[in-house]
Amino acid sequence: MDIEEVREFCLSVKGAEECFPFDDTVLVFKVMDKMFAFMALDRKERGFMINLKCDSEYAIELREHHECVIPGYHSNKKYWNSVYIEEVKKDTDLKGWILHSVDEVIKKLPKKKKTTTKTRKSGKKTVKTQTTVQTATTEKYTKKSKQKVVTKKVTTTVTTTTTVAA
């Protein structure tokens, strides 16, 4: 894959967008306003490089098995890998690592945003209705120990999700 094919693949991810938040030479790819990849548009000595978010254990495994994968350049080396694009032997490997990066970002999103992300992928709209039932807090004293016993407030929330075509 070349740098343009990598860009096209990153943009093919549902909900993905590109921007230049740092400067004119670093292209950032985001999903749900969270960064999943970034790459410098200037060629390094070994070629073009893309930084991808990664599970910490998987990141180490990739570095051990692939010479083209190094600890994240200018990023948290525990969760980010840098990959020299032209050195990747199989395009499917790089595509898989990009999708893994997207999954890592989505995994850390709040539940509400995860639902939105899933519905975007399927092209369907989710309608939620929510019903809340509450019971009041009651206090009473035991006769023997004269200690106050508090019954906590109980809240039950029932959420119904209906998926309809967009």
Image: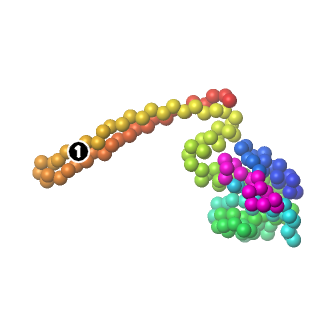
Could you tell me if residue 83 is visible in this image? yes
- The residue to which callout 1 is attached is 139
- What residue sits 69% from the left and 66% below the top? 75
Residue range (magenta) = 19-34
Image quarter of residue 73: bottom right
Could you tell me if residue 103 is visible in this image? no
Whether the magenta-drawn stretch holds residue 1 is answered as no
**Is 165 or 97 nearer to us in this picture?**
165
Give the amino acid at mark 1.
Answer: Glu
Whether the magenta-drawn stretch holds residue 31 is answered as yes
Residue 153 percent across, percent down from the top left: 33, 43
- What residue sits 70% from the left and 55% below the top? 36
**Is 23 or 17 nearer to us in this picture?**
23
Residue 49 percent across, percent down from the top left: 81, 63
In the shown orientation, is residue 152 left or right of residue 59?
A: left
- Label 1: element kind: strand
Residue 138 percent across, percent down from the top left: 25, 42
